Image (tube, helix red, strand yellow):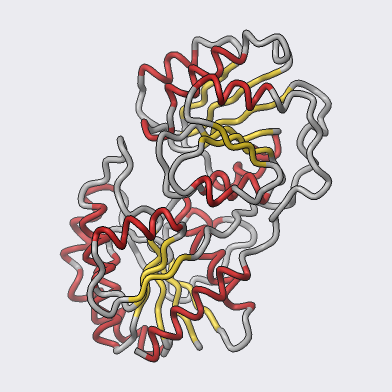
Amino acid sequence: MKILVWQWGRRGAGPLVAVAMARELAVLDGVETVLSLSTGAELLGLPDAPENVLPMRTYAGRAGLVRRVLETPWTMNRLVRQIRALAPDVALCAMPAALDLVMAAALRRAGVPYAVVVHDARGHPGDHVPMQMTLQRWLTRGASTVFALSGHVAGQLRRSGLRKGQRLAVATLPPFVFGAVPPLAGAHGGKLRVLGFGRLLPYKGLDLLADALERLQGLPQAEGKVEVRVVGSGPRSAALRRLEDISIVSVENRWVPEAEIGALLGWADVLVLSHLEASQSGVAAAAVAARRWVVATRVGGITEQLRHEKMAVLCSPDGTSIAQALAGLVGRPPPLDGGVVAGWAGSAKVVVAGLQAAVRG
């Protein structure tokens, strides 16, 4: 079975997920994968960049999006020709993006069924991407199979309604491996290094994190033994200002290029996820792959994602619980067997079974 995996985002988790999925699916017997990425995908500049078999010129900014929409008739004809030349049995959208309806229409004209991986069934508070969920709903309506990356998201999709005959399957988020696996957490021999990493948006619980770190610096077992970095991009907020005022915390409000992520994870001993709600977490997947401790709130799909990980500490979504969980890791050596660091072979089999059903359908 030949699978065309596409994801037309330029930065962030989308292209990474597409590449990880394509590589893991291709390991299975009888499966061949080809990739379609944005020509502007940041990861294409990395040393181990994958082959972009079907490149798509996307856009930067609203004016660029308008131009791409106006070019749709020409883009569509070209895509149909390229898809027919590649002759895939099925296509898989690894993470929805703005121009996916163009690909969906081209696939229909080429007679190729497609499936969609849904990371979030609903928009996150503070994550204001115009029409994001509406476009995703239109895209998934045309899909033969929909994959949710957690049971939590699958439940939301069922409640929102699937069209008659549409298949829904639950997969898992693949681990994000950034370069070589770093030395074990704590190997540097200094203070416990705590990292809050990712988009600095309200649903990440930045107020909770500020509460936790204010408490943490006053706990006897943690006094003088913890340093914290909060790194990511987001709007200026009262929560960020609170974090900047905490003596053990440094805040770096910036976009982190993919080439820097491995070193950032390697610096940390523990990743803290103070989410108020979540579908699942790419940061958690990256932390697990890097053999880092993870302190995470018991919300949404994070619980099921981390429940079997030996280096995960789940706590209540309040500042006291997060502070106590972090303090409990001061001086604590990691287990020799950190947990499920290897790939997601079981989930890849779920995806292939769903795609085979789409082809048969």
Quadrant holding the C terminus = bottom left
**Along the viewing direction, whichever of 305 and 129 lies nearer the viewer:** 305
Residue 5 appears at what percent x and percent y?
A: 45, 73
304 with respect to 191 (left or right): left
Q: Is residue 132 left or right of residue 211?
A: left
Q: Which residue is drawn at 41% across and 53% down?
A: 152
Position of 65 relative to 90 (above/below): above
Asked which quadrant contains residue 70, the reply is: bottom left
Observer-nearest of 82 and 295:
295
Residue 197 vs 225, above or below: the answer is below
- Say which quarter of the image contains residue 249: top right
State the residue at coordinates (25%, 54%): 133
For the image shown, how many numbered marks are present on the structure? Answer: 0
Question: 150 or 6, which is in the foreground?
Answer: 150
Query: In the image, residue 285 lies at what x, y percent?
Result: 58, 50
| Side (left or right) of 130 relative to 119 | left
Q: Is residue 282 left or right of residue 134?
A: right
Q: What x and y, as percent, mark residue 157?
A: 31, 60
The residue that appears at 55% across and 47% down in the rendered structure is 258
